[in-house]
Image: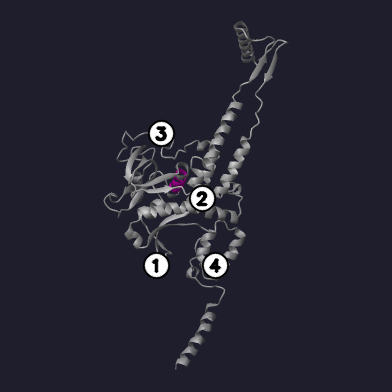
C-alpha cells in the first residue's frame, strides 16, 4: 500500500517542461521577441570590425576576473567581512535577470571603453531612491548616456519587462557614472586608438576594392579618338570586349593585332600597413599591453605590470564611483565599503607553490586549509589545519621553553 501511495505522490507532483503544464499558464503576449540577445552591448565606430575588439575583450575579461564585493572594514581600514546585501549579490552572483555578476562587470568595462563614459543604474530597489538614500539594490543595468544636464542625465537602458531599450532621465546622484581612465588614449577624437581605427577602416576599403573582381583594363586603339564618331566607335569596341569576357566560360576575349591592352589591377604600394603597425605598437605601449598578454605567453613581471597600469585604474574607477553613489554617508561611517580582491597566486607556477606554502605557514601568515584551498583541495577536518602557527616547531617544547622564564620572573618579584 505504501508503494502505491509513494508512486501516486510522485505522479501527482512530478513536472516536466515539455509534457506538463504550469498551474498558472503563460500569457499569450509574452513581449517582443528577438533572434539575438537584445541587451547585449553593441560596439560603435566600426570597432566590431577591427582588432580593437580583441583589446577591449581582453581587458574586460581580466577586469571581470577580479572579485568586487560589498565589505565591512575594521578600524584600520582592513577587510573584516563580506556584507550579505543586495548590492553584494549584484556584484558577485546576479546583477539582473540576464546577467551574472561577472558578465555584468564585463559589460561595464566593454561599454565604458567603447563609449568613454557609461552609467550603472539601479533598476529594482527596496525603497524609492529619490526619497531616501537608505535603499538596498536588487538589480542593476549598464546604460548609455545620451544627454548631460546640470544634475541629471538621460540614459538608454534595457527594460527586461518590455523587452526593449528605453530612454529615461534620472538624477546623477542615483547612478554611478564611470568614465574610462584611459579616455585620452582610447576615446579622444584624435587619440591613438581612434587613429588606428580609421587606418584599419581604410585598409578594409582597399581590400574590398582589390578583391571586387574588376579587371581594370586600358585598351589602346590604333586611331586618335577626338571626334564623336571615333568616341562612339571606341565605346562599341569596349562593350564588345566586355561582352566577350562575360559571355565566355573561361573569361577569354580576342582583340585586333594593332590594339594594346594594359592591366592595372596590380597592388599599389603604400605605407598603410607600416602606419598600422606603428600605431598598434604605440597603443600597446600606452595601454600597458604586449602581444604576450593577448596570446597568454607573458611572464609574471609583465602580467604584474599590466595589472597595475591597466586593470587597477579601471577597477578603482568602478569601485570608487559605486562607493560614492551607492553607499550613504552613514554606511561609510559604519566602515562599509566596496573593494576588489585579486588572487595573487593565479600567476604562480606549480613548482613554486610548495615553497610559498612553506613560508606562509611557517611565518603564520596563512593556515593549512587556506593553502589547500589555493591548490584546489578540499579543507581538512583537523582543527589544527585552521590554526595560524608554525607546525615545524614542537608545540610542547615551545610551551616548555616559555614556562621557565615565567617562573624566573615570579621568583624575582618575590
* Quadrant of res 256: top right
**Numbered label attached to residue 34:** 3
Residue identified by numbered label 4: 360
Residue 380 image point, x, y percent: 50, 65
Q: Does 83 sit above or below residue 188? A: below
Q: CA distance from mark 2 to mark 4?
A: 26 Å
Q: Residue at x 61, y 42 (%)?
A: 278
Q: Which mark lies nearer to you, 3 or 1?
A: 1
Of tags 2 and 4, which is closer to the observer? 2
Question: Closer to the N terminus: mark 1 or mark 2?
Answer: 2
How far apart are labels 4 and 1 at the CA level? Answer: 25 Å
115 to 265, vertically: above or below: below
Residue named by callout 1: 75
Quadrant including the C terminus: bottom left
Can the viewer see residue 246 in this picture? Answer: yes
Residue drawn at point x = 42 percent, y = 56 percent: 69
Q: In this image, 374 relative to 414: left or right?
A: right
> Disc 3, disc 4: CB below 8 Å?
no
Q: Which residues are magenta?
A: 104-111
Tell me the residue that label 2 is attached to.
Answer: 62
As drawn, which residue projects farthest toward the left?
Answer: 131
Secondary structure of the residue carrying tag 2 is helix
Labels 2 and 4: the sequence-earlier one: 2
Amino acid at each position: 500500500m505504501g508503494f502505491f501511495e509513494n508512486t501516486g505522490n510522485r505522479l501527482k507532483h512530478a513536472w516536466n517542461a515539455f509534457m506538463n503544464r504550469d498551474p498558472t499558464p503563460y500569457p499569450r503576449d509574452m513581449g517582443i521577441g528577438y533572434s539575438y540577445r537584445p541587451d547585449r552591448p553593441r560596439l560603435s565606430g566600426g570597432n566590431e570590425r577591427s582588432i580593437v575588439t580583441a583589446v577591449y575583450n581582453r581587458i574586460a575579461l581580466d577586469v571581470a576576473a577580479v572579485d568586487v564585493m560589498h565589505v565591512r572594514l575594521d578600524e584600520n581600514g582592513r577587510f573584516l567581512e563580506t556584507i550579505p546585501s543586495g548590492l553584494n549579490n549584484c556584484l558577485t552572483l546576479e546583477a539582473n535577470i540576464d546577467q551574472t555578476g561577472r558578465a555584468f562587470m564585463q559589460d561595464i568595462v566593454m561599454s565604458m571603453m567603447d563609449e568613454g563614459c557609461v552609467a550603472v543604474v539601479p533598476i529594482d530597489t527596496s525603497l524609492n531612491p529619490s526619497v531616501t538614500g537608505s535603499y538596498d539594490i536588487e538589480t542593476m543595468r549598464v546604460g548609455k548616456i545620451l544627454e548631460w544636464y546640470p544634475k541629471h542625465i538621460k540614459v538608454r537602458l534595457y527594460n527586461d519587462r518590455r523587452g526593449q531599450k528605453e530612454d529615461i532621465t534620472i538624477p546623477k546622484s542615483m547612478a554611478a557614472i564611470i568614465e574610462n581612465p584611459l579616455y585620452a588614449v582610447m576615446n579622444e577624437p584624435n587619440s591613438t586608438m581612434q587613429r588606428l581605427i580609421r587606418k584599419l577602416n581604410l585598409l578594409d576599403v582597399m581590400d574590398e576594392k582589390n578583391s571586387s573582381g574588376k579587371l581594370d583594363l586600358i585598351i589602346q586603339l590604333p586611331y586618335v579618338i577626338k571626334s564623336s564618331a571615333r568616341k562612339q566607335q571606341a565605346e562599341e569596341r569596349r562593350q564588345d570586349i566586355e561582352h566577350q569576357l562575360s559571355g565566355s566560360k573561361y573569361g577569354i576575349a580576342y582583340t585586333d593585332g594593332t590594339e594594346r591592352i594594359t592591366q592595372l589591377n596590380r597592388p599599389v604600394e603604400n605605407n598603410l600597413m607600416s602606419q598600422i603597425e606603428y600605431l598598434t605598437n604605440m597603443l600597446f605601449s600606452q595601454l600597458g599591453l604586449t602581444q604576450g598578454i593577448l596570446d597568454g605567453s607573458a611572464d609574471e613581471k609583465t602580467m604584474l605590470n599590466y595589472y597595475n597600469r591597466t586593470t587597477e585604474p579601471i577597477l578603482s574607477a568602478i569601485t570608487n564611483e559605486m562607493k560614492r553613489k551607492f553607499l550613504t554617508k552613514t554606511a561609510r561611517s559604519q566602515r562599509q565599503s566596496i573593494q576588489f580582491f585579486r588572487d595573487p597566486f593565479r600567476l604562480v607556477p606549480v613548482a613554486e607553490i610548495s615553497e610559498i606554502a612553506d613560508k606562509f605557514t611557517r611565518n603564520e601568515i596563512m593556515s593549512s586549509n587556506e593553502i589547500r584551498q589555493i591548490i584546489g583541495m578540499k579543507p581538512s577536518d583537523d582543527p589544527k589545519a585552521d590554526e595560524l602557527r608554525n607546525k615545524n616547531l614542537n608545540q610542547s617544547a615551545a610551551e616548555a621553553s616559555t614556562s621557565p622564564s615565567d617562573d624566573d620572573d615570579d621568583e624575582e618579584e618575590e
